[in-house]
Amino acid sequence: MDNMSFKNSLIMGVLNITPDSFSDGGQYFDTEFAIASAKRMVANGADIIDVGGESTRPNAQSVSENDEISRVIPVIKALSAQINVPISIDTSKPQVMKLAVEAGTSIINDVNALQADGALEMAASLDVDVCLMHRQGSATTMQEKPTYGDVVEDIKHFFDQRIDACKHAGISKDKIILDPGFGFGKTLAHNLEILRRFDEFKSFNLRLLAGLSRKSMIGTVLNNREVEGRMVGSVAGAIIAVQNGANIVRVHDILETKDALLILKATNGEKIG
Ligand code: 9MG
């Protein structure tokens, strides 16, 4: 993508299959509800649906492999027969990656950047796109005291190492998507600096993903706004990320993000529709 074209900016819709993401307050995993949500996202303009069965929020409860599989696989199987956009699987577990790809997923979105035992080898054998996200620390420690020299340079160094690891495992470079991981082991100042300097990741010549939607960085800037009131701030963040080079934005509010992207494209003289 050249610097001034937003033609290829894609919207990845978030489909969480976790207890707190259901209309019934988490009593039942309702496959039909998840499928209806995904279909609505596609109708509203989502280009990719990201299915996840384990919350990646700081200090979220971990989920066993079996539970994660029973949450996501039936949804992926049903969705792959009913929607015509790519499905990604948000997981760090090799066995979940395998079953998800067999069920119809074509992207692995790993917030652990394929660092779990066997994850690199599994991703290589599955031969699908992989999103490598940066996180400082573990899921439980990441927000304790994030520290960097130069946050962007440190993340670029991490990307260099993970790209190398992928290469050695047999994952071709063009399958890799890079993501600096907003909110994962970062202070507000780090997150804002990453957003401001996002274009520096373009030096890898790989697709770049940005996920800021409804995150606490948005809430903090908006005077500690609760998650329900973060939609406009999230859309603004997504647009800044695209302007600064993001090719994929991972969002909850599809229609609103799509509208804002259309305005950005029209402003830059791109043909709409
Ligand atoms: C699963 N998940 C939650 N936040 C994310 C982010 O910012 N990027 C990616 N790739 N995945 C995320």
Image (tube, helix red, strand yellow):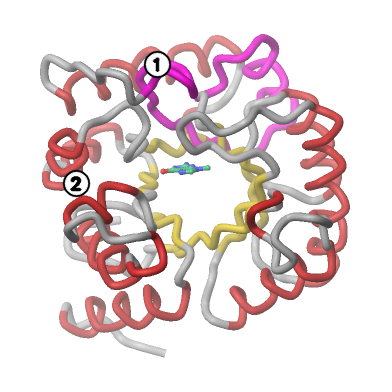
Does residue 120 belong to the magenta stretch?
Answer: yes
Q: Which mark is residue 212?
A: none
Image quarter of the N terminus: bottom left
Expressed as whole percent of the image width and height from the top left, the position of residue 232 reads 28, 72
Q: Residue furthest bottom?
A: 273
Amino acid type assigned to the residue bearing label 2 in the image = Leu
Image quarter of the C terminus: bottom left
The crowd level at tag 2 (other Cα within 10 Å; few <14, some 14-19, many 20+) is many
Which region of the structure is painted magenta?
A: 113-142
Amino acid type assigned to the residue bearing label 1 in the image = Gly
Q: Mark 2 — residue? A: 195
User: Residue visible at 81% across and 46% down?
Assistant: 71
Nearer to us in this view, 27 or 109: 27
Looking at the rendering, which quadrant does residue 136 occupy? top left
**1 vs 2, front mark:** 1
Cα distance between the residues tagged 1 and 2: 20 Å
Q: Mark 1 — residue? A: 137
Is residue 53 positioned above or below 122 on the image? below
User: Residue visible at 21% across and 32% down?
Assistant: 187
Q: Secondary structure at mark 2?
A: helix
Is residue 147 positioned above or below 193 on the image? above
Q: Determine whether label 1 and label 2 are within 8 Å by CB.
A: no
Expressed as whole percent of the image width and height from the top left, the position of residue 255 reads 45, 80
Nearer to us in this view, 238 or 185: 185
Q: Is residue 14 left or right of residue 93?
A: left
User: Residue visible at 34% across and 69% down?
Assistant: 229
The crowd level at tag 1 (other Cα within 10 Å; few <14, some 14-19, many 20+) is some
- Mark 1 vs mark 2: which is more N-terminal? 1
Q: How many marks?
A: 2
